[in-house]
Image: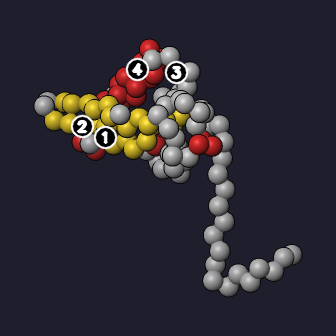
């Protein structure tokens, strides 16, 4: 499902809502998951993305859902403040280890 914001007759923001999470560990069963999102860079900072997210939350609430999940790159300087500012709360973490070419599998 797609939520689209228009300004001056032009599409300026998009939020995609999926009813099945592509990563089930990130989203409770049968609860909406926010997938791909985008905002035209020329319209950022005008509240359009926030208004669109509130439209998604209003839809979810009126549809009887109890939560909405989103997964974003926490190091992204735009995503982190946006989603935390929209009162989304971190509920998990992910770890990753890069292996350089000289790794031999040794311990200690």
**x 51%, y 46%: residue:** 22
Relative to residue 60, is residue 24 drawn left or right?
right
Q: Viewer-nearest of labels 1 and 4?
A: 4
- Position in image of residue 11 (x %, y %): 20, 36
Disc with the residue nearer the chain's start (1 vs 4)? 1
- Position in image of residue 39 (x %, y %): 31, 40
Rounded to the nearest angstrom, the CA distance separating label 1 from label 4 is 20 Å
Residue marked by disc 2:
12
The label on residue 39 is: 1
Is residue 82 in view from this perspective?
no
Crowding at dot 1, Cα within 10 Å, few <14 / some 14-19 / many 20+, comes out as some
CB atoms of marks 2 and 1 within 8 Å: yes
Q: Viewer-nearest of labels 4 and 2?
A: 4
Relative vertical location of residue 105 with respect to residue 91 in this rendering, above or below: below
**x 37%, y 22%: residue:** 55
Q: Nearer the viewer, residue 25 or 81?
A: 25
Where does the N terminus fall, quadrant-wise? top left
Rounded to the nearest angstrom, the CA distance separating label 2 from label 3 is 27 Å
Q: Viewer-nearest of labels 2 and 3?
A: 3
């Amino acid at each position: 499902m797609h939520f689209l914001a228009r300004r001056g007759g032009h599409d300026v923001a998009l939020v995609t809502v999926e009813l099945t999470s592509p990563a089930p560990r990130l989203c409770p069963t049968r609860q909406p998951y926010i997938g791909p999102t985008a905002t035209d860079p020329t319209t950022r900072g005008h509240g359009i993305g926030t208004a669109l997210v509130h439209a998604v939350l209003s839809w979810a609430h009126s549809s009887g859902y109890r939560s909405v999940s989103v997964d974003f790159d926490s190091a992204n300087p735009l995503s982190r403040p946006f989603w935390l500012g929209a009162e989304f709360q971190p509920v998990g973490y992910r770890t990753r280890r890069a292996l350089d070419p000289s790794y031999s599998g040794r311990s200690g």
